[in-house]
Image: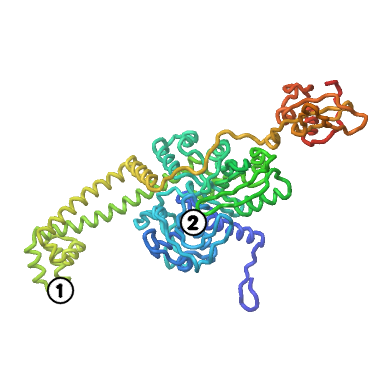
Amino acid sequence: MSEPGGEKIIPINIENEMRTAYIDYSMSVIVSRALPDVRDGLKPVHRRVLFGMQDLGVLSNRSYKKSARIVGEVLGKYHPHGDGSVYDAMVRMAQEWSLRYPLVDGQGNFGSIDGDPPAAMRYTEARMRKIAEEVLADLDKETVDMRPNFDDTLEEPSVMPTKIPCLLVNGSAGIAVGMATNMAPHNLSEVCDGIVAYIDNKDIDTDGLMQHIKGPDFPTGGVIYGTAGIREAYETGRGKVILRGKTHVEEDPKTGRESIVCTEIPYQVNKADKLHKGVADLVTDKRIEGISDVNDYSDRDGIRLVYDVKRDAMSSVVLNQLYKHSELQVSFSINSIALVGGRPMMLGLKALISNFVEHRHDVVVRRTRFDLRKAEERAHILEGLLIALDHLDAVIALIRASQTPDEAREGLMSSFGLSEIQARAILDMRLQRLTGLERDKIRDEHAELMKLIAYLNSVLADEGLRMQIIKDETLEVKEKYGDKRRTQIVHSSGDMRMEDLIADDAVVVTISHLGYIKRTSLNEFRTQGRGGVGTRGSSTRDEDSSSTSLWPRTTTTCWSSRRKVAATGCGSTTSRRATARARAVRSRTWCNWRPKTKW
C-alpha cells in the first residue's frame, strides 16, 4: 500500500504493537535497571559506577575526586540515563546505614539517617573502599564477558568477578514491572562460613546453612524476633521478619523516674520523622500514654532516643505501646528475586550460595587460563633468550654482520630455529642482560615459570583444587573484612496480647446488688488510723443499688478474657461472662451486665 507521494505505508495491528512495545519495555526495566544479578549482586548502575571509578583510578589508597567528575565519567562512557540515578546510587553505596558493607568512601555531606538529602555532587568527593577493590579483583584477566556500551565505542563488564557475595551481605531492593525484589543484608563472616560449608557438602540443607548464617544482619542493628520468617525466606525466597529497635530502661538516681532509651533503630526507618516527631505526635494524640517527653540526643557517637516515662506509668507497658503504635517495631518483607542467566527467579538461601560459588568457579577457571597463557608466552621468550645466551658469540656476530634489523631477525630465526617473538626479544635485549648475574636471573625466572605452568595445568585438571582455591579466597575475605553481628536474634516471639498493654496494678473490684461492676485502683483506698473519721470508699451508679461483693485483685491476672476466671476465684468460666467482665474493668466505668447465676 502506497500513497501518491511514493511513501510506503505498512498497516499494523495496534494491539500487537502495544503488546510488543510493553514487553520490550518491561524486560528492559527488569534486566537493565531494577533487579540485581545473582552472581555479583549489583545492578547495572552500581556496576558502572565502580567501573568508572576504576577507570579514573579512584582507589582506596588514592586521593578523593569530586563526585561530579565521577558521575560525568560514568554518564559519558557507560550509563545512558540521567545524572540523578548515578549520583543517588553512588551516595547509597557510601551510606553506612544503607549498606551493611559500604563500597564507596564519601567525603562531605552524603545525607543522614534522619532523611536529610546529600549535598549536590559538586560539593562532595568520593573514592572506592578497600572492600570494593575485591569486587573488581582480576577484572583485567578476562574473567568476565565484556559488552559494548550504549554507543558501541567502549566496552563494559556484564558482571563483576567479585570475591564478595554482595547480594547476600548488602542485600538489594528494586521495583520492576510486574515484580519487585527486597533482599536483606547479612553478616560477611557468617556468609563466608556458609559458603565454605556448601563447598564441603553440596547436599547441605537449609538447617545446615542456618548453623552458620543465623539470619539477616542489618546495618542499623536492632533485634529480630523469631526465626520462623527467616527460615521461610531461606527455604522459599519469601518471608517476613519482625524487627525492633534496641532499647533499655534507665532510672534517674536523683528523681527515680524511668526513661526508655533506644540505641539502635529498625532498618530503613527515618529516625527524625518516625521515632522522634512521630512518637511525639502519637503522645499528643493520646494513642500512646505514659510518656511525658521525647528527646533525641543522637550524635556522632551513636543513636540515643530518650522517652521519659511518667511517674504513674510502667516502662514495660509504655514500651509495648511503642512497639504496637510506632515504627520502633516494623516488619521486613524478604522477596529474593534476582537475575539468573538474564531471567528473574525467586531464590532461597542455598540457591543464592550455589549461584555465587558457580560464578566464582567460572572466574577461577578463566583467570587460570589467562595466567597460564601469559606464563607460557613469557616462558617462550625466556627460552629464546637462553638459546641466545648459550650461543652468545655467534648471535653477536650475526647481528653485527646484518645490515638491517629485519635481516638480523631473519638470520636469528633461520640459524637458531627461533620464532619471530623470540628473535624480536633477543634484538630488544639490553647489553646488561649479557652479564653473568643477569643470565642467572633469566634461568631462575624460567625455572619458576615452569613450576607455575605445571601448577596452573593441575588447577585446570582438578575441580577439587579449584574449589579449594575458592575456599581459601573466601576465608581470606572473612579474615580481612569480617566483623561481629550487629542485629540480635531472639528465638522466642509471640503475638502481642491485650494484657501487655495494661499495667499490672493492684485494684479493687466491686459488684453492686443490681449487677454493676466497677474497678477502683487500690491506691484510692486509704488506711484509717486510730481516731480517724473515715473515708467514703466507693459510690454506686444508682441510689437503689448497693455494693454486695468486693474483691482485691490484680488487673492483668484476674480480668483477662483469654484466661479462665475460675482460676482467680471469681466465679463462672464461660467466655461471654469473662469477656464482659474484662471490658468492664478495662473501661474503668460501671456497666449494667447482670450474671444469670449468682456468684
Position in image of residue 434 (x %, y %): 11, 62
Secondary structure, mark 2, is helix
Residue 445 in sight: yes
Q: Which of 203 and 221 is in front in this view?
A: 221
User: What residue type is disc 1 on?
Assistant: Thr
Q: In the displayed structure, would residue 530 be above or below residue 67? A: above
Q: In this view, does 365 lie above or below 67?
A: above
Give the mark nearest the N terminus, 1 or 2: 2
Horizontal side of 371 relative to 322 (left or right) equals: left
Task: State the separation of the CA atoms marked 1 and 2.
Answer: 58 Å
Q: Give the answer, above or below, for where 276 lies relative to 420.
A: above
Which image quadrant for residue 231? top right
Residue shown at 83% from the left, 21% from the top: 599
Residue that mark 2 sits on: 93
Q: Which residue is nearer to you in this view: 160 or 70?
A: 70
**Residue sitting nearer the eye, 88 or 499:** 499
